[in-house]
Image (spheres, grey):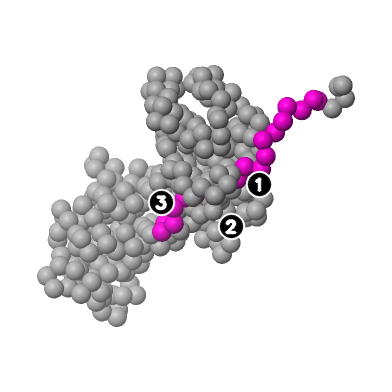
Amino acid sequence: MSYYLALLSRQDKPIYELKFGSSRQGGDGQPHFDKAMDDLTPFVVHAALDVVDDVQWTTPAMYLKTVDNFYSYMISAFVTAGNIRFMLVHETKNEESIRQFFLDVYDLYVKTLMSPFYRVTDKIQSPAFDTKVRALARKYL
Amino acid sequence: MSKVRSVGEEVWKHKTDKINSELLTLTYGSIVAQLVADFDHDYAKVNKQLDKMGYNIGLRLIEELLAKTGLPRCQNFRDTAEAVAKVGFKMFMNITPTISNWSVDSKQFSLVFTENPLAEFVELPDKPNARDLWYSNIYAGVIRGALEMVQLQVEAEFVSDAVQDPSLPTEIRVRLVKVLEDEIPPGED
């Protein structure tokens, strides 16, 4: 099973992207999107942003659960207080794990944000952030 | 010298106003980030500026330290090291760096920090020469300024910093240059 995670800035620009596979049920941790889907993931995520714009005002929660579908794929979203959108493309319904995953990524994101040399619209280039997100992916998904 | 430690803890507990450490971290962080922007990533200049700022802070902090603690005169440089680590850093930063690596002549020592409130959350900018930046160089200036006011001319500089390389400790080397004599101001006989 494959996942695609994107963090999008307020201007809808991706500040961090990661494709990974499930490490549960004997998964090897590598993404296995088929060729067509592999290229489409960023577009699928952007299409789902419109739904996020509507849904985010209907609930006080940051985790919006599954907001959109694309053929067999689902798109889950998490909106931070600073309106940074975390988007995850996934194949199976797994709300609780994804919620935990988002919350921990949020923690990491806040830490990155606290670094004096990081500006809000910058791409996240920190290798430490990358390593930790991958570790979370292994832990929860 | 365990007395020195208890003096430090006493003054931290009862006589020091505290602020939220994240406020300090973020304030210092924005100062450094602004300096880096102003000097256009010339890290040597940033280090120098931080040292200068620290020096001016140190000149004043020593007065407060002595006023609040009533610490007696240090008999030798080893006493001074204890006072800097266990009273100075304790009362202003609530950390106690370890003193180590004494030189044979007892004129040089290292302060090793296991925690550093200034550098929490910090990730250095993604530039090839970012390793030239001593992020917490203000400490070095503070030590230099404070000791100069008690007639000790020292040089203080960073040797390694955990912000640059997490496998290394944060270490400041302090070198005693000379004990300043009371000098008559120029122009007075």
Task: Looking at this view, name the residue that lies furthest to the bottom.
Answer: A35
Image position, residue B149 (x, y; %): 64, 29
Image position, residue B175 (x, y; %): 60, 45
**Any mark on residue A112, and which?**
3
Label 2 residue SS: helix
**Any mark on residue B58, and which?**
none
| Image point (43%, 43%), residue name | B98
Camera-side mark, 1 or 3 = 1
| Amino acid at circle 1 | Lys
| Image point (63%, 29%), residue name | B150
- Residue A97 lies left or right of residue B71; in this view the side is left
Q: Is residue B182 magenta?
A: yes
| Amino acid at circle 3 | Thr
Q: Where does label 1 land, which residue? A: B48
* Same chain letter for marks 2 and 3: no
Counting residues from the start of the chain, the first of labels 1 and 2 encountered is: 1
Q: Is B68 located above or below residue A96 in the figure?
A: above
Give the spatial CA distance, label 1 vs label 3: 27 Å
Q: Chain letter of disc 3?
A: A
Q: Chain letter of disc 2?
A: B
Q: Is B37 located above or below residue A93 in the figure?
A: above
| Image point (84%, 27%), residue name | B186
Image position, residue B52 (x, y; %): 65, 40
Q: Is residue B172 magenta?
A: yes
Q: Assign the C terminus of chain A to one quadrant of the image.
A: bottom left
Task: Bin the neighbour count of mark 2 within 10 Å (Cα to Cα): few under 14, some 14-19, many 20 and up.
Answer: some
Give the spatial CA distance, label 2 vs label 3: 21 Å
Task: Bin the neighbour count of mark 3 within 10 Å (Cα to Cα): few under 14, some 14-19, many 20 and up.
Answer: many
Label 3 residue SS: helix
- Start-end of magenta stretch: B166-185
